[in-house]
């Protein structure tokens, strides 16, 4: 479904992404790991059109995405969330989700109904009339997810599923991702919590300093010497 | 609700009842009566206060409210700060004035041509600048606004610095958009223009386009991740805004019948329009109108008491007001009204989950 071929991006002297290639099949979850600065978010930005790659190409369902704008890529069926959450702060929760719905359903009344379904799915229905500003981090993550889901993507890129949320909030978020998968969604998720990743991901891609250092099943990655050195460190091994 | 929940957080009944709610609380009877009363009052006003001065003050208030509303569409709703809106005012004034002066083309047609030219100019400015992030758009509009004024100061064809004196025509006043001996027609024409701008804002606010504008203002990157073509919608906001501003310029031209670059293209006009919208409450329907209704009388009164252009005393008062509003009502004068409205909504909402 998603094919990434030799993606590279340089910011000044920094090679943020260096010749990264991988594939994701439909219905699978790919986890992306790597220490801060490994190039995970840059990779998402390159795939979704927020940055133009210096080299390489991205194909989605056989279509080239390189050079398309983020909104075009979204309308082709690629949704994403952001590591630094970006709720529309002056809107209510339901209005936030309506923005995502409206590319398919421009009428306000019908759009609101679909938005409420998406909010129900992520468990934010009761907050529908609140301002997005009033939400906790965990709730904002759910809101971003509902908003992205509302655009009806076939592929969803989630930048940090659980980053910045407390322990109590974790299980709910994980279950949400599991439900997405069970409904056939293809996912690429950036995640720091290895435990979370072990239970969710079918495949893991490990990045370090902009390079792909390993790819494989979670158990393989967990025991990969290079990954342990660069990322997991002594504490985990 | 906690974050630890199983499948659907709520039963189907809760979802069904949520869906039955209206998106916004319908306008209350009191509110509807208020609008109707105000409409009647504005139509009756020139007959109740039947002398030129109150007519003039109201005309100027409406004209500035129209300009502030036009800026509000672009900046208040879509978040793109223009500091050169006078350019569109001037283009509207010159299209109308010059075509009538040189070719006897009806000012109404001249106005439409001005609107189209302003929209084209908005696209020409918007496409390169809207792609850039940050303050480039504001800077670009500021410089273009100044540039256009300089061009018109040197442009011999349209009278250069001395501008255009429109020929006085007494036949067919409606067609030639000139009314002598009474300000009444001007009053109703500009009131209609303002009403048009308000209807545009009202409709936008209740449409997908309005949602997209607000999304772009709040988080442009998130908007584009949801399929919103940010540059396209910004350009659209700019076009509507420029067109309405240009209508105000056309009206001004016909109201005073003398235009020159100093009066229709000044930076101070661009800034004043920003001031009114921001003071009244940017991003709201009534803010720009409240702003104009407060600031215009101050300027007109200082002119009466201190002569000439008010000896810039009005500008000093504006400055003081801005400081006061920044401190006490940063959301604009409308903040005071809106708070009360939000309270009323909360009482009405069964769920108790009011907006705001």
Image (tube, coloured by chain):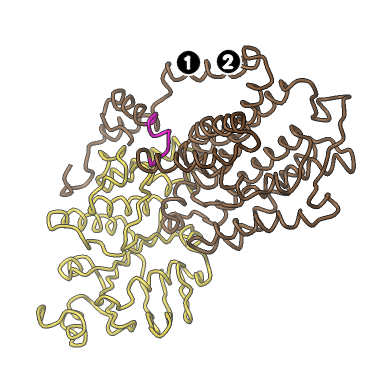
Chain colours: A yellow, B brown
Horizontal arrangement in the rendering, residue B246 relative to residue A34 (left or right): right
Q: Quadrant of residue B127?
A: bottom right
Q: Is residue B231 above or below residue A58?
A: above
Please tell me how many numbered marks the rendered image carries: 2
- Can you give x and y, in whole percent of width and height, for residue B313 in the image? 54, 39
Q: Quadrant of residue A109?
A: top left
* Residue B336 belongs to magenta span: yes
The foreground one among B209 and B43 is B43
Query: Please, what secondary structure does the residue beneath circle 1 have?
Result: helix
Q: Is residue B237 above or below residue A236?
A: above
Q: Which mark is residue B350?
A: none
One can see residue B223 in this view: yes
* Residue B305 belongs to magenta span: no
Crowding at label 2, few (<14), some or many (≥20) Cα neighbours within 10 Å? Answer: few
Q: Residue furthest top?
A: B48
Residue at x 16% of width, y 45% of height: B2
The subunit carrying tag 1 is B
- Can you give x and y, in whole percent of width and height, for residue B245 in the image? 64, 42
Range shown magenta? B330-338
Horizontal arrangement in the rendering, residue B134 relative to residue B43 (left or right): left
Residue at x 38% of width, y 69% of height: A44
Could you tell me which quadrant the N terminus of chain A lies in?
bottom left
Q: Between tags 2 and 1, which lies in front?
A: 2
Residue at x 59% of width, y 60% of height: B140
- Can you give x and y, in whole percent of width and height, for residue B187 in the image? 68, 24
Could you tell me which quadrant the C terminus of chain A lies in?
bottom left
N-term-proximal mark, 2 vs 1: 1
- Can you give x and y, in whole percent of width and height, for residue A2 in the image? 41, 70
Give the residue number, with chain letter if any, for mark 1: B33
Horizontal arrangement in the rendering, residue B292 relative to residue A37 (left or right): right
One can see residue A7 in this view: no
Q: Which mark is residue B40?
A: 2
């Amino acid at each position: 479904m998603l094919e990434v071929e030799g993606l590279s991006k340089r910011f000044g002297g920094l090679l943020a992404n260096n010749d990264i290639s991988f594939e994701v099949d439909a219905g699978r979850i790919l986890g992306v790991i790597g220490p801060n600065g490994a190039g995970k978010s840059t990779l998402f930005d390159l795939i979704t059109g927020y940055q133009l790659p210096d080299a390489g190409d991205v194909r989605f369902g056989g279509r080239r995405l390189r050079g398309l704008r983020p909104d075009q890529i979204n309308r082709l069926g690629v949704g994403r969330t952001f590591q630094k959450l970006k709720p529309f702060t002056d809107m209510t929760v339901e209005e936030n989700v309506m923005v995502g719905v409206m590319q398919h359903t421009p009428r306000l009344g019908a759009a609101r109904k679909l938005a409420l379904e998406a909010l129900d799915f992520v468990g934010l229905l009761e907050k529908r009339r609140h301002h997005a500003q009033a939400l906790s981090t965990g709730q904002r993550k759910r809101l971003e997810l509902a908003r992205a889901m509302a655009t009806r993507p076939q592929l969803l890129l989630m930048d940090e599923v659980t980053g910045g949320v407390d322990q109590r909030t974790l299980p709910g978020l994980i279950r949400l991702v599991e439900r997405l998968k069970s409904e056939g969604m293809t996912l690429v998720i950036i995640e720091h919590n290895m435990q979370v990743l072990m239970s969710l991901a079918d495949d893991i891609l490990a990045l370090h300093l902009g390079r792909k250092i390993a790819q494989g099943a979670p158990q393989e990655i967990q025991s990969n010497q290079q990954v342990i050195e660069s990322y997991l460190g002594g504490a985990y091994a | 609700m906690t974050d630890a929940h199983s499948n659907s957080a709520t039963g189907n009944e809760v979802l069904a009842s949520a869906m039955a709610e209206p998106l916004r609380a319908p306008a209350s009877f009191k509110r509807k009566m208020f609008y109707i009363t105000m409409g009647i009052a504005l139509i009756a006003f020139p007959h109740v206060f039947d002398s030129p001065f109150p007519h003039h003050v109201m005309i100027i208030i409406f004209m500035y409210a129209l300009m502030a509303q036009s800026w509000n569409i672009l900046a208040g709703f879509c978040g793109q700060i223009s500091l050169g809106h006078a350019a569109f005012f001037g283009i509207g004034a010159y299209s109308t004035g010059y075509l009538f002066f040189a070719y006897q083309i009806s000012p109404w047609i001249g106005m439409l041509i001005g609107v189209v030219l302003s929209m084209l100019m908005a696209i020409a400015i918007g496409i390169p600048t809207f792609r850039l992030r940050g303050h480039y758009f504001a800077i670009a509009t500021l410089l273009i606004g100044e540039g256009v004024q300089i061009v018109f100061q040197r442009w011999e064809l349209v009278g250069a610095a001395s501008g255009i004196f429109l020929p006085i025509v007494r036949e067919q006043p409606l067609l030639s958009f000139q009314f002598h001996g009474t300000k009444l027609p001007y009053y109703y024409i500009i009131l209609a223009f303002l009403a048009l701008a308000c209807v545009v804002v009202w409709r936008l606010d209740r449409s997908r386009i309005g949602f997209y504008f607000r999304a772009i203002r709040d988080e442009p990157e998130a908007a584009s991740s949801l399929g919103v073509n940010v540059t396209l919608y910004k350009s659209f906001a700019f076009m509507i805004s420029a067109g309405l501003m240009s209508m105000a310029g056309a009206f001004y031209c016909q109201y005073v019948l003398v235009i020159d670059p100093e009066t229709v293209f000044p930076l101070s006009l661009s800034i004043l329009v920003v001031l009114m919208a921001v003071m009244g409450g940017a991003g709201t329907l009534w803010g720009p109108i409240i702003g104009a209704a407060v600031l215009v009388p101050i300027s007109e009164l200082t002119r009466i008491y201190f002569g000439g252009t008010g000896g810039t005393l009005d500008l000093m008062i504006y400055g003081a007001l801005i400081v006061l509003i920044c401190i006490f009502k940063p959301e604009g004068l409308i903040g005071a009204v809106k708070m009360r409205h939000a309270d009323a909504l909360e009482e009405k909402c069964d769920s108790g989950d009011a907006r705001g």
